Amino acid sequence: MGEPEKHRILMVSDFFYPNFGGVENHIYYLSQCLIKEGHKVVVMTHAYQNRSGVRYMTNGLKVYYVPWKPFLMQNTLPTFFGTLSITRTILIREKISLVHGHQAFSTLCHEALMHARTMGYKVVFTDHSLYGFSDVGSIHMNKVLQFTLADVTQAICVSHTSKENTVLRSGLPPEKVYVIPNAVDTAMFTPAPERLSRDEIVIVVISRLVYRKGADLLVEVIPEVCRLHPNVRFIVGGDGPKRVRLEEMREKHSLQDRVDMLGAVPHAKVRSVLITGHIFLNSSLTEAFCIAILEAASCGLLTVSTRVGGVPEVLPDDMVVLAAPDPTTMVHAITRAIYMLPQIDPQDMHNRMKKLYSWPDVARRTEIVYNRALKCSNPPLLDRLSRYLTCGTWAGKIFCIVMIVNFLLWHLLQLWKPDKDIEVVPDIQLPKSQHEETPLGSRKEENL
Amino acid sequence: MIQMEASISGSSSPTHPKWRKVVYGGMQPGFGDNHTDESFLEEMIMNANVVKRDLLKVVLDAVSISQYLCIVALVVLVWTYTLTNTLTEKYLLLLNVSLLGSGFFILLLTADMIPFNLLLNYLLKNTFFITALYMLSPIYHTLTRSISSNSIWALTASLLILHLFLHNYSGSTVKAPGALDNPTLTSNISLNASIVASLLISSRLPSRLHVFAIVLFSLQVFLFAPLVTYCVKKRSFKLHICFSLQLLVLTLVFTYQLHKLLFIVLLGIFVFVNLVCPYWLIRIQEYKFEINGPWDEAKLCFNITE
């Protein structure tokens, strides 16, 4: 890997704690591991309710909650140039060397990457989701992604399917796109201390109960499985618009004593729910990676999942049973899983997961991408504009105009508030002893 | 952890294992994270759902559109003749009765069987409707008195254009008995636009009987003509084509008598809708580019009954 070069990285995304999900998790763990490797990491996100300003998290991870109001699904209003000033200030204050944006539908990420490129920073982008090509929403999103990725230095995807998708959507050369998966904190997701008895088999479902997560599939599958296997019980954790349908199903087939509906499960309690079951059922209709499967496997559960998106790449064949997303095959798969159960040793499963996935490995591989990104040449604005022009007959011209305006605004800002007037933050050295081998799981946060 | 590190640094192993499309187990020995395999995009399917279209079939399908254009043009012609007093209220009422009679007759002929009770129900409802309309016609007569005629013409024209744009040409907003699917929002807006247009026009007429006759006529056509033509089309496609051609000739003859320029415009529209547009559609098919692959959201193979 060459000389250990220390970077100063700015992670940008609309999605960060206190919000919870795959992206938030990824940013947090990646940042923690990078800090351990000796890099400096700063996170930039928008303000969550009254959480605005600068906060510090475990191991001195600094988070800027930019006072920018979200308007839809935790996304900020796209303003193109509105965030230029604050992005520039953060970049200079923290002496950032590289900007890393996350998630294709985060407006803040797109804007910050655009500003960073204007100012000549190297940028890396991680795509966490899959998009189709047919509906209006996707077509629009794909155009925006094309704009951001037209000039991105390197891109990262979480699975090979996601890479194919991103390359098709953005037209990036495939060798510029890296595949680095998510990981799971195996220290946090450990199996139950004692093996559960197999007299009664418990199938756990933890997901938001929405259409995209296949809640309708569950409505068809659960009664059929209960009919076929009298010793099976379901635990359904999660909330959402489709919860009513599941409850209806439970009433209709009188399964009140065999289907537990827990409602929303906070992430800290996920493990305690998982370890009460033998089989984890994932019914998603689309999934770029699916961290939930990893968490379940790490807790020693056998997974049954729909064969969609990047899911088939996530686990070895003997740890997961895959099925096409239709009720009959799903029921078959669950039956197969029930017969496989005696051969599954949760502790063994957990130990294998430890070898298959770890955040430090993800961080090391991301570092390689950073090193390559920093070695890339930085062409002048005029050369870069030609890349935008190829994005489309009309879109290309609009993108160019946006970039030129941004460039002018940046120079105006430099005149109005020169770089040397922006105070640079001194690096705080945390006492080393505290974080030598602490597990990453315990997330503490101090308000400053 | 140690094994993983070994696998990262162990890229110099003499036997290169095959690259696998998996993400577990750290970086694959011998391959970088940006390795692009030959199997890249192997599962991409292009233009899977594209239908090859036949020009003749598209032309014949487009006949439904021009047929409805004819119907609307004929309604506008009747409006014009009534406004210029060429058509008296007596003839108008006669036209109404004959339209209603022939409409029911066609429905009876084309539908396989309508139960007697349902028919009686229809007749009863129609009687109620016509009586109510008759009682309301004085109100309609004076409804838009205070608005200038120019505004009324402009509004009527734009409402009719809106009606034509949003009309559901493949079915009928008023459903045949036993139809399951609900009409869409756009087709409802379209229907309402046409009703408002006929009410606006009726307020420019000299007498209450005129108003009653013209509103009844317009409502009959706008509400039930799509249903009747739909039934005819379902019964026999040939009959549908014949019927449409007759309507087309009728419309063109009447328009020719009324106004030469209007005739040319109408003829142009018919040629455009029936010949140019189908040809255009076939031509732009080659630009169709549809991509499907494993990243698509899975479609459920059963119906969700909320």
Image (cartoon, coloured by chain):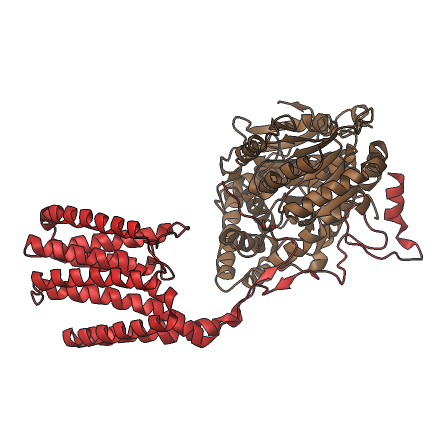
Residue visible at 73% across and 46% down in the picture: A322
* Chain letter, colour brown: A
Vertical relation: A440 (above or below) A363: above
Comparing B289 with B266, the one in front is B266
Residue A191 point in image, percent of width and height: 79, 29
- Relative to residue A174, is residue B68 drawn left or right? left
- For the question of whether residue A40 can be seen, the reply is no
Quadrant for residue A195, please give it.
top right
- Relative to residue B16, is residue B294 drawn left or right? left
Comparing B114 with A201, the one in front is B114
Q: State the quadrant of the C terminus of chain A.
A: top right
Residue A209 point in image, percent of width and height: 58, 36
Residue A381 point in image, percent of width and height: 58, 57
Instruction: Name the outermost residue toward the front.
Output: B116
Q: How many marks?
A: 0
Residue visible at 56% across and 42% down in the picture: A211
Quadrant for residue B279, please give it.
bottom left
Quadrant for residue B61, please give it.
bottom left
Residue B35 point in image, percent of width and height: 77, 57
Instruction: Name the outermost residue toward the right.
Output: B14
* Chain letter, colour red: B
Vertical relation: B37 (above or below) B125: below
- Relative to residue A368, is residue B232 drawn left or right? left
